Image (cartoon, coloured by chain):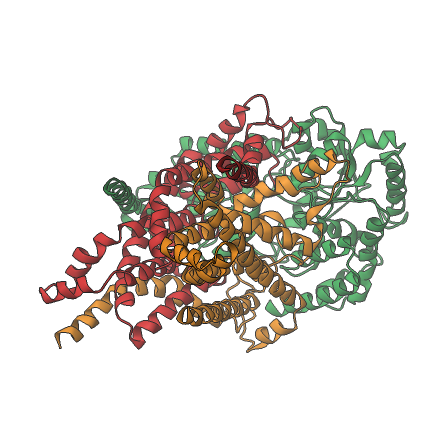
Chain colours: A red, B green, C orange
Amino acid sequence: MKKKTSAWKYLLSALIILIHAIPLYILIGVAFKSKMDMSSRWILPGYIWWDNFKNALFRGDMLLALKNSFIITAGSVLLITLLGALAAFPLARHTSRLNNGVRGLIMGVMMVPPLSILVPLYSNLAHVGGLSTYWGIIGVLTAFQLPMSIFLFTNFIKSIPTGLDEAAAIDGCGPFRTFALIILPQLKPVIASVVILTGVNCWNDYQFSLYLLQSPKFKTITLAISSFFSLQSSDINAAGAAALMGITPVVVFFLFLQKYFIKGMVDSAIK
Amino acid sequence: MKKLLSVLLSAALIGGLCAGCSKAPKEEGGDSGIEVSGEESEKSKTTLTFVQHMSGVITDELQAVLDEFEAETGIAVEMSSPGSDIEEVMKTRMASNTLPDLWTTHGWSVARYGEYLRPMNDQDFVEHIVPSIKDLITGPDGNIYVLPIDADICGISYNAEVLEDADVEPESILTWEDFEAACDKIKAIGKTPLFFDGKDPLAFGQFFDFVAPTLYTNNDDINRREEFLDGSFDWKDWREVCEILERWTKKGYLNTDALTADYATACQALGKGDAAFMLRNANVIVEAWTTSPDARLGILPIPGKDSDNPRCIIGGERLAVGIWKDSPHQEEALQLIEYLAQPEVCARLATAAGMPAGLDNAESDTGKLAPYYERVMSDDILTIPYFDREYLPSGMWDDLCVTGANIVAGNSGAIDETIEQMRQSYETKKAQQ
Amino acid sequence: MMKKRNKNIINLFYVPALILFSVFVIYPFIEGIRISFTNWNGYSQNYTYVGVKNYIQLFQDKNVRTALINTLIYGVGSTFLQNVIGLLYAVFLDSKFRGRMLVRTIIYLPVMIAPLVMGYIMYFLVQYDNGAINDILAVFGRQPVDWMNNGSRAVIIMTLINSLQFVGISMVIYMAGLQGIPGVYYEAAAIDGVSGFQAFRSITLPLLTPAITSAVVINLIGGLKLFDIIMALTMGGPGYSSHSLSTLITNQYFRAQNAGYSAAMGIGTFLLIMFISNVTMRYFDKKEVYS
């Protein structure tokens, strides 16, 4: 009886895996094939065409792009996490008219279509010398990812009993110490969720990086990949190799963190 | 959990540190324009910013030339290559008036970039610009704003084997009627007569650039040139060019995936001999040879409206470099222009671009294409500018692309809508000027 | 007294976030409102104010209407698919069997891929010539199909792609939600003779309401702002037929050089997203109270 139930589960699992693995499978096929190989996309080549990777590495400057993406993502994620947790504390603990307004504003920011503010944003950054700098792009990405972080943190902090911070207040702790000593340590599980959800968006950002990081020294992974796919280029296979190289770090990162991630989501997304 | 946190924290710290250090490069960039005078005096430290729109082999050659320039003069050049995003990138930069020191003008040195570029009339290379493009890059004020490294010579790219199989003599295609007869023959042998890579609708914009001039502007005696320029053109007459595209679609000359094929597919189809013609410059031929090295591919002049009108080719600037008139590094930028204008450097770059050189003292080796270029640049063939750049206000290129796609998609009333959109857009764009 | 002061000090905690928003979002947004009253072409130094002309045009423009309908399909369609499939996946993976971690990981992995890159990859599947889907059709002796040459079909395909890529997020949220439901509820229900689908309807769904709210709001905003996949697959074409409002904004800003009009479109899109998400949140807020 028990064996029978598992059988359909494995069958269904296999089907699900099949469907969701198709994009990666196709990408691997493309990345390994030579440009002259016109066989079906379903057929993996019996060889690895290293030229694709060589092309991607050297012409696409993948190492530099990896470094830039890493710096930008790490910097943004640090700010997103820190400022998000800070902002969520009063918003979760005190419901006043002012704070409701602030919450509405933050949700509003989440809904601004990025392109609609691009040119004014660009001019602003140009005036203060923030184009093609790490701090410029980190600031922009942080601002656009913060609402999600605040959203998750607020939900989570609401689920922490207020008893502890009240006790701390009676003991004479100011809000800063209450936050640092009582709240922050309890946030650990949700941090993994925030890091993964927003970190992926920063790593994969295309629109802002394209315009705000025009100097080739600041090229990011997504820019490097997209310039390979850019319509005037016909070397699809090298582009596939570049895409594969760009995806690998986040995938590995996720595989290491996923345990904490799921746990964090339990506590944050559903308060 | 602790481990995770410490990993994250240290990662973030490193990030923060790097973000701190990274402010340094900003000072060398020409973008900010806030140069500290102390640093300015260190001439050897100058870095020029250079935005260029080409991709592929030429990019590598360009980088090599810039490296040699740096080794020789000590002036570094930071080249960025946004590829097909060049339009957007340059428009944001114009909007905020933070242009690069130099950039390639992709056909717009006069109409769009003229007001931002330093006139080059005082430069030695000007007298060497090949006659076929000289007029095309000269503004109404007589100014030339760019160094044209190559000359864009744009005719119909074709696969000679397919034409032979279909018993079509390329030199006999003198009018659009001949062209359609050829297409019928090609279709009869089961090949695609005309390939469009419409995933990027620029393919349809190209159609109008090829066909519209033959109907409206090529004839010196009877033409509508003034009407396009002063706005008196009756857009109802635009129907004529639209109907040609519609007819070709209905007759089945186009590939099945005309609306969705990408550039790589197009190059392959031409190279493998699945398709006969493409309304695109020889770049497709160069790309097609990378997968089908033995394919016999060539360039054909654009047919005339009828036998009274000569055939033509489209000429213009392609890899053409200009200097921002407000660049803080005028002198160094000029030095680079002089370097690029040397015959051997210019020849090298034009060769890599696969196009004839833009200067007459440089000899580009266009290899297998050389005889074709020689043929289409002869006297009996007219050289015309890109229609949209010459006769339409900046910004209408998109209208050509999109309306063309609508016609090919076979939407009912597409032609009427096209006429209306062209009329409206023309008015809007004129009002912006 | 003391407490009141603390309350105000505590509000300082969101000041850094507000400063960031002001500099990078709100100020440019206000600038955008100003631009929306001009006929600026997006780059020149001169333009004229044209009043509310751009806004009036929004209501007359057929392409805006198409993009609006597409945006709703992208937004509502993906939200629906992601939540239904995500919930089914979560329920399935909530049962214990070996290898379910692997299934979960594989479902979530595509979320890590940049949507732009996902679009490029998907082109390998849907393209006419040598496309992976047409290869399968060929095995069954069917004629190849040019999948993206029809706007409505392209919109549906891209909604599907977006849904399948991001279904992992809803799945994880629902898995989290399911783990938060105490098992005793089901035991009690079983004693009353309630089990299976009925138990799912009367216990699981109501208790999942907070999770549903989070998942729906996150997916809705993501879907309504869909951009990268469209740019990678159709660029809004053929014609204007598969544009979302986001891609049409870019198209009008840069390619068509109607920056003023595009800015008005941006403001309109913002208001639309705001309206839809607020209605959704209100709806779920009420539900939560009742359950």
> In terms of depth relative to the viewer, which is nearer, B365 or B98?
B98
**Residue B118 in picture, x, y percent from top left:** 51, 52
Q: How many dots with numbers? A: 0
In the image as oriented, which residue stretches furthest toward the top?
Answer: A47
Closer-to-camera residue (A136/C20): C20
Residue plotted at (71% across, 27% down)? B368
Residue toward you, A255 or C204? C204
Give the image quarter of residue B391: bottom right
Q: Is residue B51 above or below residue C25?
A: above
Residue B404 coordinates in the image, percent (x, y): 74, 55
Left or right, C72 with respect to B1, comes to right
Q: Is residue C24 above or below residue C50?
A: above
Q: Quadrant of the C terminus of chain A?
A: bottom left
| Residue C210 in view of the camera | yes
Query: Which residue is outermost to the left?
Result: A171
Up-down: is A152 above or below C127?
A: below
Q: Quadrant of residue B289?
A: top right
Give the x, y percent position of residue B394: 63, 59
The answer to whether residue C238 is visible is: no
Which residue is depicted at the point 26% across and 53% down?
Answer: A187
Q: Is residue C72 left or right of residue B11?
A: right
Q: Position of residue A61 (x, y in %)?
A: 45, 35
Identify which residue, A191 or B319, lies in the foreground: A191
